[in-house]
Image (cartoon, rainbow, N blue to C red):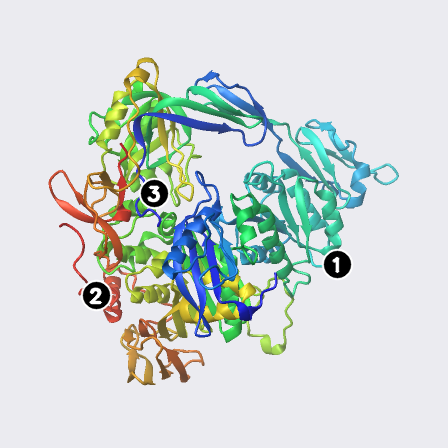
Amino acid sequence: MAKAYTPGLKVTNRITHRVKRVLPISGEVLVKVGDEVASSDVVAETFMPGDVYPLNMANLLSMPPSDVPECMLIQEGEEVQVGQIIARTKGIFGMFRTEYKSKVAGTVESISGVTGQVILRGSQQPVRVLAYMTGRIVEVLPREGCLIEADVSYVQGIFGIGGETHGPIRLACASHEQDLTPDVITPEMKDAVVIGGARVTDEAIKKAVEVGAAALVTGGIDDQDLRDFLGYDLGVAITGSEKVGLSLIITEGFGDIAMAESTFSLLKSREGDHASVNGATQIRAGVMRPEVIIPLTGEELEREKEPVHTAGALDLGRSVRIIRDPYFGLIGEVSALPHEQQILGSGSKARVLEVKFNSGETVTIPRANVELIEE
Amino acid sequence: MTIDPDNINVILATDCGSTTTKAILIQKVDGVYRQTHRGEAPTTVEEPFADVTIGVTNAVTEVQELAGLKLVDENGKLLHPAKGDVGCDIYISTSSAGGGLQMMVAGVVKEMTAASAKRAALGAGAIVMDTIAANDKRKPHEQIQRIRELRPDMILLSGGVDGGTEAHVVQLAELIAPAKPQPRFGSKYTMPLIYAGNKEAAPLIQEVFDESIDLTIVDNLRPVLERENLGPARDAIHDLFLEHVMAHAPGYDKLMGWTHAPIMPTPGAVGNILQRIAEDQRINVVGVDIGGATTDMFSVFNGVFNRTVSANLGMSYSISNVCAEAGMDNVLRWVHFDMDERELRNRVKNKMIRPTTIPQTREALVFEQAVSREALRLAYIQHKEFATTLKGVQQQRTVGDTFSQEVGGQTIVNNMKLDLLVASGGVLSHAPRMHQTAMMLVDAFEPEGVTRLAKDSIFMMPHLGVLAEVHAQAAVEVFERDCLINLGTCIAPKGQGKPGKPCFEYEIKGETLNESGVMHYGELKLLPLGEGETAMVSLTPMRGFDLGHGPKKKIETQVRGGTVGLILDARGRPLVLPEERSACRTAMTAWVEAIQLYPEEEPAAVGVG
């Protein structure tokens, strides 16, 4: 049977992490196995074929398509400059000839006597792939890219916007329950990965953009604030290409919700360290969640031990987060796992579990509505 | 391979979805084919398994345990033919794993050949990523840029009627060739392109493309403006789907060796079975499959099949988009109590980012079903706009047509002529009460006249769609007996009236149900007519109302019962809800009570213990 609960988000003080960095089309890989790279180093580059400019020469010069090839002054494969005459009609007895001057620079790719169409291709555009994560090259994919590995502290968020960025970690909130408001954002946070606590407001995000922060990481956000900031209502959770001035990562969800205490403590313990952040989220088959990666260096490598990971199974005593109303965001311990399906308040039948909160209160929740807190 | 239908006793079918692989077993019981057992397992296309057959074997293993048969050998391979308790006679499969089949289509005129090409691709079960046409209002360089950005699995190019102008379609090819569309499977994959345009232009098209494109030329899908010929293009899409797309998906080469009929894209198979049923029973059918991300809509009217995919209308991944497109006011009109809008918006987004959660409270369920009504309504509007008569056809008019405004491009979807409405997909099939499923259909589709409502019990239509290719009789028998759960029949006149005024009179005569009365405008009534029961109804609409034979014209017909019963709907068509929020809530409350949508006597809610 399929697992009927959401696997938890990964939050760990030490893990060996690999990132794959590949070019969109084949090109040159600039690193070799064993190289140490920093997040802003270029690891591979290539040149994308230039933009294509179709010119309907038959229409432009008012002649039949079949006449186009012999009226071309530039042949396939030859280069053209801006303003260069590339075609001239035969005219009448050599008089009244009309010409076409190229508006772009590039190469003539094809000339068609059927449609009268000439295809010009602009100059090549360089594409560079950065390392993104500070680490060591462990594998080179010839002409494609490479794999980078590092021992890191790793925090996965539930939702984010904006792409890859990096910067030092700066704490804005004193506790995981403190809202991230504009007054705690300061000019010193320029280029930093700013850590908040609970809900972030639209004004706080705007202030962070104003001071030039690289990224914001916090517990929750109100849908209205996200809409106000983006300027539109997000329809599907496929993000990463937004150009909004920073990357934003939400660790828990939408609404008034505090960051999980363990996540906050981890980020707090790494204040001042350099982090790589990616807000890109894709929630479809092949889920992609936003992430904060903090490579371990020197003494941290000695100090931080890789935790013993328990298998991703629901057991009595495991910590879980409830991820749907009416108890959304609450964290507790599994206190019972009844085998039989039960009828929910909605009238549906589903497998359930009992969750005990710190207060001693116990609630029954569908198994689909909890996620494991990975420790 | 040739299969002798008479010797087929055990049929195994799987559907490899993006997340779950579902297996069903069909056996001959007392001379008729019945679906007997089912099993499911997570799909194993992605790492760490990267072999789809593992999920298939797991799902089949569950079936064999339930059925007490041996269907899989020690090496995880399916056994056949059937001998006693071992093996199956036929194994077939559909697939939508890895995001299904994604295509780009191109045609010369957006409303004509490009629309026909889109119909062919959708009908074959593809997701159409974009339609490029000479008149799509984009500049050529914008079109090229778009082609470069897309990463389709396959391209379908059409344009021009046979013997017509060649230049336009060649020009389109000249845009596609330099764009060098990149497939999603990486650089080793050669992009398949199907040319189904003006046959005279085929040699010129061949010259345009180099070896980076794998060109297949088939018959023109619009040989003359008056007629579409989508079959050859659809077949070519299916062939190339197997040769290219499937061959690149992990484990599919192995799976293809197991099956006794070509693997079909899941939606293509659903379309197949609905077409067959419509043809067999000479009825008009609409089928819907509402998923987490998308909603697939199928219709067969007067033998013409259409399919649309509403890419961002769904109940989990796309729930936020449904609310954004429909507007929260439109969603909330289906809710019969007060809800805090800000809170709701956050809940919608939380469902979007954690799509596997389920509603725990009645309040959450009512809201989700309200969203589904809007998702279905919007998807149906898109379907109606797409399923049209052919555009660009010259119309011959006589003096008698002077006052008729009919032109080409009218929708062929006619709710009054609709006979059967079939529901499938999580929110519809997993609703705690079938009454809720029925009312989601009635509210969203607004069927007119007399319409039978049904749901696909366990989403078996894909399996039966492929089965129909090899054993039509078995497919039709199972469809009727096990696939559909009859919900009942909806009777709803078209027209508008004043609240409380008579709308139609009814007289029902049956073995278990004998009633007569008057329905007043704005009323909704549920009468008990159980599964397997039928009744004769005599209906007389009042002035301004029509039940299919014209305004005020009486109709007499037989209706089928079901798990819900007979729904008498005098709310008028088109269905207009009161605009003022409290009036709307009052109306909804009355309707909820009339149909017993959310009865209070259900067991106490699970909650604080």
The residue that disc 3 covers is B353
Q: Position of residue B335 (x, y in %)?
A: 26, 59
Q: Do labels 3 and 2 share a chain?
A: yes
Q: Is residue B192 visible?
A: yes
Residue in the foreground of this view, choosing between A186 and B131 = B131
Q: Which mark is residue B163?
A: 1
Vertical comparison of B463 with B420: above or below: above
Type of residue at label 3? Ile
Residue in the foreground of this view, choosing between B362 and A191 = B362
Q: Is residue B544 visible?
A: no
Report the mark closest to the observer, 2 or 1.
Answer: 2
Q: In which quarter of the image is residue B214?
A: top right
Numbered disc 1: secondary structure: loop
Q: Residue at x 57, y 56 (%)?
A: B262
* N-term-proximal mark, 1 vs 3: 1
Type of residue at label 2? Pro
State which chain disc 3 sits on: B
The residue that disc 2 covers is B599
State which chain disc 1 sits on: B
